Amino acid sequence: MNQISTPTNISQTALVERFGDIPKLVMFDLDGTLVDSVPGLAAAVDGMLIDLGCKPAGVDLVRRWVGGGQWLLVQQALEFAGLPEADYLDAGVKGFRKHYAQCSDQGLTLFPGVKAFLEFLHQNRIAMAVVTNKPIDFVPKILESLGIDHYFPETLGGECLPEKKPSALPLEHMMARFSVTAEQSLMVGDSSNDLLAAQAAKVKSLAVTYGYSRGVDISQFASIWLGDDLSQLCA
């Protein structure tokens, strides 16, 4: 069980002003929140489509599909290719995962302000964890390749529990791991899955505008902060 130290040297920040207190745990979504992972996802989708005898979709199109998990991503790729889901979905997901295992770190970048915000939380001894719907076996390589793995002693993937976001269960599981309450926690995300999970778990949320929202207006979720650069919360 992780033990959390009391944060120090943190005052008069936008984070504290909006949260009303100093959080003990900040949970992060991965794709679209911390990391722009579309290049690797697009390469895996295109590899899968080529294996099935279809033309590749390309980065721009795949970027519109990302945000709903691997099954929905593959479903949309099959629809693009004109292949019936009933016949090709299982093979498509298997092919996607085969390719993604080889290219998950391709073209990865951190979104602006992410590294500064992570370091800000780390310096103030606020615990951090990743709660993603991405299969967990891809997560360590991504975090390590970007040099941010040391910020996250705990990670939770979409296949780790019976339910994934927008269920409250992943957030509740992570809060239990750190022995904190919902009132002591924050969720940072870019999509309705993240923000609905936070609502269900009664956790306040920070919403970023630059991610993979799939056309959903994330301002409707009454997050305590909505912005395009997490470093704004370090001031």
Image: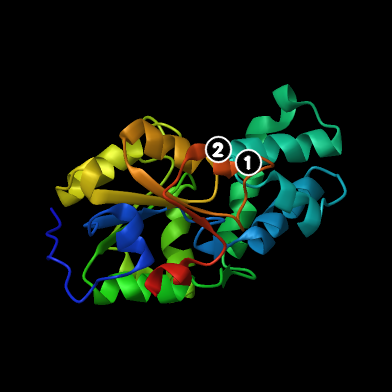
Q: In screen coordinates, is 192 left or right of 198? A: right
Q: In screen coordinates, is 146 left or right of 10? A: right
The amino acid sitting under disc 2 is Gln
> Could you tell me how many numbered marks the image carries?
2
Residue identified by numbered label 2: 220
Mark 2 element type? helix
The amino acid sitting under disc 1 is Asp
Is there any visible trace of residue 168 in the rendered image? Answer: no
Q: Position of residue 32 (x, y in %)?
A: 57, 56
Q: Position of residue 5 (x, y in %)?
A: 12, 65
Q: Is residue 205 positioned above or below 3 on the image? A: above
Is there any visible trace of residue 151 in the rendered image? Answer: yes
Q: Is residue 4 positioned above or below 165 on the image? A: below
In which quadrant of the rendered view does residue 3 lie? bottom left
Mark 1 element type? loop
In which quadrant of the rendered view does residue 148 lie? bottom left
Is there a contact, CB below 8 Å, between mark 1 and mark 2? yes
21 or 194: which is nearer to us? 21
The residue carrying pointer 1 sits among few (fewer than 14), some (14 to 19) or many (20 or more) residues within 10 Å by Cα, namely few
Q: How is the image coloured?
A: rainbow
Residue identified by numbered label 1: 217
Going 82% across and 31% down the picture, which residue do you hit? Answer: 83
